[in-house]
Image: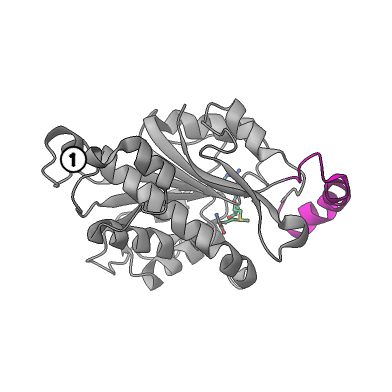
Amino acid sequence: MKYGMDDYEAAIRPVKRQLFEELAAKLQRRSPAVVSDGSGSPAGPSRVLEVGIGTGPNFPFFTAALAGVATGSAGEASGADSAAAGPAQIPAPTQIQIQLVGLDPNPEMLRFARESAAQAGVRLASGLPGGDAAGGDAGTTPAQSGAGSALEVAGLVEGDVGSLPFADGEFDAAVCTLVLCSVPSQAAALAELRRVVRPGGSLLLIEHVAAGPERLLMRLAQSVLTPLQRALADGCCLNRDTGRAVAEAGWDAREGGALRRFDLEGMSILAPHVAGVLPRA
Ligand SMILES: C[S@@+](CC[C@H](N)C(=O)[O-])C[C@H]1O[C@@H](n2cnc3c(N)ncnc32)[C@H](O)[C@@H]1O
């Protein structure tokens, strides 16, 4: 994952850039202080959970989006959302803070994620949950770096998205990129994400999916190749209808609305994707 995803990351970069900007803009708008008095000084950091954080490829997108919020450019790409909110509700540019908790069942991934955070200049909280005592991040010492960053990694937790060790509504948003292809139960994962995200919160989702029914050959190829892909790629399935599962789990995933379906150029049978920043319905 750390060294073999360069082509994928290059292809998905514009999508990620836009969606993380959209998420940052939503978090800024929903900040209690911004809503209540418009003073531009949020009461506290937004809490975001990233499940299946892997090696941490999304840190640079968080930091770039937060920088965009600070300059007032974040969310400009999300035309529909901005139009719905109306110009009067968009506050003046302010800095927002995000406390991020990363979760992954694989402790090796968490070790790489910690390194990626430091490389991206992201602040790492001392005494991280899931650290040495819990065995989630053994062998590393909490470090302080990127102290000026608006993003702090508050925890790197070893765990399963199907059974999250967090309270109801604990997070303002969740991030899930390329995870639902390999979880044992999409329904359980999506229900847990909905439980821990507060009402009115968001899910940033990017997943490769099964081709639509109109592309029979592609669907067939994805089904035939899935057993091999599962064996080679840590349980990854090529033939899941993730868009439908997300909608059934209570996220606003209407295609043509918050959820976009598109082909990622050059990605062959991994090309069909769904992505969006989905409101918690
Ligand atoms: C293809 S990687 C994607 C990593 C990263 N999100 C990205 O976009 O590159 C899938 C990740 O999901 C994690 N994962 C697999 N099963 C999981 C589960 N049940 N709960 C949480 N994460 C899981 C894997 O350990 C891996 O880090």
Q: What's the residue at 74%, 48% (across, down)?
A: 237
**Amino acid of disc 1:** Val
Q: What's the residue at 87%, 44% (across, down)?
A: 216
Q: Which of the two residues, 192 or 14, is positioned nearer the viewer here?
A: 14
Report the magenta stretch's main SS: helix
In this rendering, the answer to whether 28 lies above or below 36 is: below
Using the rendered view, name the quadrant where residue 233 is placed: bottom right
| Marker count (numbered) | 1
Part of the protein shown in magenta = 210-235
Q: Secondary structure at mark 1?
A: helix
Residue at which label 1 appears: 34
* Crowd around label 1: few <14 · some 14–19 · many ≥20 (10 Å): many
Relative to 77, 191 lies left or right: right
Q: Position of residue 59 (x, y in %)?
A: 42, 62
Using the rendered view, name the quadrant where residue 11 is placed: bottom right
In this rendering, the answer to whether 176 lies above or below 268 is: above
Q: Position of residue 129 (x, y in %)?
A: 37, 49
Q: Position of residue 36 (x, y in %)?
A: 15, 33
Q: Which of the two residues, 40 or 135, is positioned nearer the viewer here?
A: 40
Using the rendered view, name the quadrant where residue 127 is placed: bottom left
Q: Position of residue 235 (x, y in %)?
A: 72, 50
Q: Which of the two residues, 67 or 44, is positioned nearer the viewer here?
A: 67
Relative to 268, 117 lies left or right: left
Q: Quadrant of the N terminus?
A: bottom right
Give the colouring mode of the picture: one colour
Relative to 223, 268 lies left or right: left
Can residue 220 be found in the magenta stretch? yes
| Residue 227 in view, yes or no | yes
Q: What's the residue at 45%, 60% (across, down)?
A: 17
